[in-house]
Image (tube, rainbow, N blue to C red):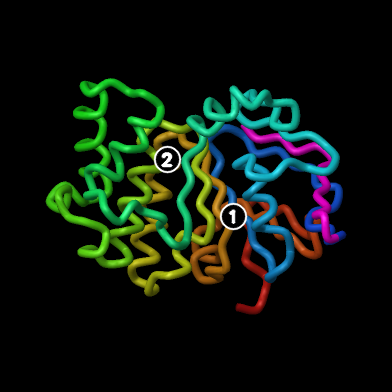
Amino acid sequence: MILLTHVSKTYSNGTMALNDISLFINKGEFVFVVGPSGAGKSTLIKLLMREEVPTSGNIIINDFDICNLARKDIPYLRRSIGVVFQDFRLLPNKTVYENVSFAMQVVEASSKEIRRQVPFLLSMVGLSHKAKMYPHQLSGGEQQRVSLARALANNPAVLIADEPTGNLDPETAWDIVKLIHDINKRGTTVVMATHAKEIVNSMKKRVIALEKGMIARDEEKGAYGYES
């Protein structure tokens, strides 16, 4: 569950990135966040990850009060959120298996849990046979699959995907979106910021469209609505 109440964000240089945003995303929803460059998508994602805090308003994610969260509790929030980035952000000196297991080691999962969970996740994203390879030995699509497996390592309630298909060819992009859709069908809430017009229009999911830091549209089965 994600709740934003009258959220605004103004950066120190005076730029107002978000202006009085209120929205509710229910458990298990799949939501696209769209809008032109500078609309506020990146800021919204950073707020949800608690990389930034709002200038005003309040954010609740998975029962965590983002704005009043003690520093010691931030890791617990982030365990409940999986994140997939456009540029993969894999650790180059670790194998596929080690990249995924590292996410579990950080939260002090047991060796037994890691040995059970990592092979399951690699199987789910179709990469069991590449467990011992390094990121530079993989295609872009394969790297994004590893990134997805890593994001799911700790069974997050929410998956945030920030332009996850931005560096991929159209066919590979669809493969990744189908995987994310499958993850959503298992009960994980998905928030995906994207410029991928064809994907948004074909999926017919909820679309939250931002313009100039405000919500321009919030449609249950929405369309992209902007020129690519």
Query: Cβ–Cβ below 8 Å for labels 2 and 1?
Result: no
Question: What residue is at 85 percent from the left and 52 percent from the top?
Answer: 19
Q: Earlier in the sequence, mark 2 or mark 1?
A: 1
Residue at mark 2: 185
- Residue 160 image point, x, y percent: 53, 46
Number of other residues with Cα within 10 Å of mark 1, as a class: few under 14, some 14 to 19, many 20 or more: many
Query: Which of the two discs, 2 and 1, sits closer to the camera?
Result: 1
The answer to which quarter of the image holds residue 167 is: bottom left
Majority secondary structure of the magenta segment? strand
In magenta segment, residue 2: yes
Q: Quadrant of the N terminus?
A: top right
Q: Residue 103, image x and y in percent?
A: 37, 37
Residue 18 versus residue 109: which sits nearer the camera? 109
Q: Position of residue 33 (x, y in %)?
A: 63, 56
At 64% across and 31% down in the image, what residue appears?
61
**Amino acid found under the numbered disc labelled 2:** Lys
User: Which quarter of the figure is the C terminus placed in?
Assistant: bottom right
Under tag 2, what secondary structure?
helix
Residues drawn in magenta? 1-13
Q: Which residue is mark 1?
A: 32
